[in-house]
Image: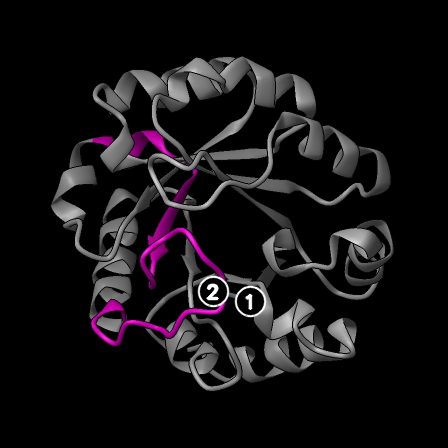
Amino acid sequence: MKKVLIAPSILSADLLKLEEQVKAVAENGADFIHVDVMDGHFVPNLTFGPNMVAALKRITSLPLDVHLMIEHPEMVIEQYAKAGATYLTVHQEACTHLHRTIQAIKEQGMKAGVSLNPATSLSTVENVMEDIDLLLIMSVNPGFGGQSFIEQSFQKIARAREMILETGKDILLEVDGGINNETAEEVVEQGAQVLVAGSAIFGSNNPVQAMNELKEIASKGIN
């Protein structure tokens, strides 16, 4: 691993200043823009949709990292492709036919990601590892920003890194939940490449400074 990638999550951004805040982080060190899509069913919160992705596409050239925390994600794949998503990540727990959903994402020209909730075993994705571009480990229970990191996630991240290495493929290992200046270095030590951070960045009075400080701290974990 050569460097840590930071994906600021707009879930914690000020929606009245969204364009300003996204442009600021995008032009000063962000690697992805992370979009949390929630439907009020798979998770209790309700957030963004394809229109938000399309709007972001107009203001930044960074990859749009779209995380679907929704039921029946296979129903909206084409909408997010048209909106401009770069990565489309679905939850293993929400997909009855996970392999088929991954293939459908790729057929629409996007990179395919799979996410696991904290209680979901890595064994559930063993048979699709060869097919994905990104594996997202949730280190909090999805649905709300600002939660505390679940300590057992460190071991899971390390095992996920081993599984990726076993494939010999260039699969990104992303971690989302409770990422801040206290957890970032060890998350990277365990093998994470992409860190999703919302409140740690946009909850700051200076999001750009907070983001770059987070990246500097996280980079100490590169081994």
Q: Nearer the viewer, residue 165 or 204?
A: 204
Image point (58%, 63%), residue name: 198
Tag 2, which secondary structure?
Answer: loop
Q: Residue at x 65, y 53 (%)?
A: 10
- Looking at the rendered structure, the kind of residue marked 1 is Val
In the rendered view, would you say 104 is above or below 22? above
Q: Secondary structure at mark 1?
A: loop
Residue drawn 42% across and 64% down? 177
Magenta region includes residue 20:
no
- In percent of the image, x 17 and y 32: which residue is there? 127
Above or below 153: residue 204: below
Nearer-the-camera pick, 119 or 162: 119
Which residue bears the numbered disc 1?
A: 4
Q: Which residues are magenta?
A: 128-153
Amino acid at dot 2? Met
Q: Position of residue 11 (x, y in %)?
A: 59, 53
Q: Is residue 207 left or right of residue 2?
A: right
Tell me which corner region of the image, top left, top right, bottom left or bottom right, holds residue 44.
top left
Q: Is residue 135 magenta?
A: yes
| Residue 48 in picture, x, y percent from top left | 60, 37
Q: Where, by quadrant of the figure, is residue 14 drawn? A: bottom right
Is 37 left or right of 163, judged from the image as shown?
A: right
- Which one is in front, 177 or 188? 177
**Magenta region, mostly helix, strand or loop?**
loop
